């Protein structure tokens, strides 16, 4: 197998390769239609990145350990409501309260999983419905205005023409997550648990603690993302922030994650979110209807699924080829 082909089997590298392809198509379409690309275009791309980014990151790290946190969408909405309700007087306290609730929600769900041996999908589906219900109750099922308009404007203030405070914070969280996963003992424990939980337990890793820490982090990231977005929009709605789940799942898969779990690192997830952001901005520039974005995203996901299938077949073929000489060894 060529070195290039081996590199493309790495999920993160494949995600960035796909990002380069989508970026090239984006620039080509803009040039062919006469659309002008500017710093404002990049600003729009990174604003879209900030909307989905933290939810995708939280979901992605649960998929890395072969679990699935459906509740991130509910916590995203609940975090926004709590941040605005508490943060109208004290924004920092409001955001901290939202993050604390996200931590608690993730811990509660993961405790049920490890204590009773339950799967993550039914538990977090229950969490999704519960968090949505709580958001409706505490908001009175209405939009809650955020009265600190100076802060709302500040969060969306351009930085270097391309970023905002919101998108810069989101990017910083991705960088920190990538460093923690790759260069710290807890991060390596997360990767080991996702690779082989049984072997990790034999090696002395407390996999239950890893699961609880990952779900607590996922909840905190979702709540932080909802709080920051609601501050930037100067409002929070119990029904307006829950449609983030499907884009988050798509971003993780495009970023090298797999529904079967065990793959998908923060940098790859960031690439996946950027791919979706480029597509959304490109569709807007071209004046295409919203469903066009869904069609293109779906086709990209199908392409990634085909590539994953080819990579799996190649790995099986290599394993069989390696085992063939062993079968011919004489038995004594």
Image (tube, helix red, strand yellow):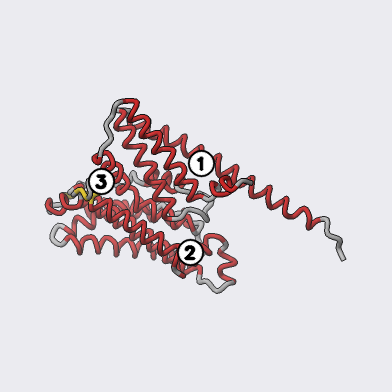
Residue 12 screen position, x and y as percent:
48, 51
Whether 150 is drawn above or below 207: the answer is: above
The residue singled out by tag 2 in the image is 190
Q: Distance between the residues labelled 3 and 2?
A: 33 Å
The residue singled out by tag 1 in the image is 304
Q: Residue at x 54, y 49 (%)?
A: 7
The residue singled out by tag 3 in the image is 162
Q: Is residue 140 visible?
A: no
Whether 23 is drawn above or below 170: the answer is: above
Q: What element carries label 2?
A: helix
For marks 1 and 2 on the same chain, the one whose residue lies earlier in the sequence: 2
Label 3 or label 1, whichever lies nearer to me, is 3
Number of other residues with Cα within 10 Å of mark 3, as a class: few under 14, some 14 to 19, many 20 or more: some
Along the line of sight, the residue nearer the viewer: 43 or 146: 43
Q: Is residue 12 visible?
A: yes
Q: What element carries label 1?
A: helix
Number of other residues with Cα within 10 Å of mark 2, as a class: few under 14, some 14 to 19, many 20 or more: many
Give the left or right position of residue 256, taking residue 50 as reference: right
Whether 183 is drawn above or below 325: the answer is: below
Quarter of the image containing the C terminus?
A: bottom right
Along the line of sight, the residue nearer the viewer: 309 or 10: 10
Number of other residues with Cα within 10 Å of mark 1, as a class: few under 14, some 14 to 19, many 20 or more: many
């Amino acid at each position: 197998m060529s070195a290039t082909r081996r590199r493309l089997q790495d999920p993160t590298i494949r995600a960035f390769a796909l990002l380069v392809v989508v970026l090239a198509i984006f620039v080509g379409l803009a040039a062919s239609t006469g659309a002008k690309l500017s710093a404002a275009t990049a600003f729009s791309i990174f604003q879209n990145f900030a909307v989905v980014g933290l939810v995708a990151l939280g979901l992605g790290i649960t998929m890395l350990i072969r679990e699935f946190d459906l509740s991130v969408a509910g916590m995203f909405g609940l975090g926004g409501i709590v941040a605005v309700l508490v943060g109208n007087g004290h924004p920092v306290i409001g955001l901290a309260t939202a993050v604390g609730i996200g931590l608690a929600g993730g811990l509660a769900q993961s405790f049920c999983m490890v204590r009773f041996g339950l799967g993550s999908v039914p538990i977090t589906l229950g969490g999704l419905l519960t968090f949505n219900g709580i958001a409706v109750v505490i908001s009175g099922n209405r939009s809650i205005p955020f009265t600190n308009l100076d802060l709302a404007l500040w969060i969306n203030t351009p930085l270097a023409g391309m970023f905002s405070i919101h998108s810069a914070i989101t990017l910083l969280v991705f960088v920190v997550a990538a460093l923690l996963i790759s260069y710290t003992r807890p991060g390596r424990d997360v990767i080991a648990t996702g690779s082989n939980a049984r072997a990790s337990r034999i090696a002395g890793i407390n996999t239950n603690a890893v699961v609880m820490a990952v779900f607590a982090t996922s909840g905190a990231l979702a709540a932080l993302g909802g709080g920051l977005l609601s501050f930037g929009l100067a409002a929070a709605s119990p029904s307006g922030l829950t449609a983030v789940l499907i884009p988050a799942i798509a971003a993780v898969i495009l970023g090298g994650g797999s529904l079967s779990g065990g793959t998908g690192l923060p940098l790859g997830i960031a690439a996946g979110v950027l791919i979706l952001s480029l597509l959304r901005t490109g569709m807007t520039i071209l004046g295409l209807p919203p469903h066009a974005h869904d069609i293109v995203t779906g086709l990209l996901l199908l392409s990634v699924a085909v590539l994953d299938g080819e990579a799996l077949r190649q790995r099986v073929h290599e394993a069989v080829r390696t085992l063939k000489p062993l079968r011919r060894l004489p038995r004594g």
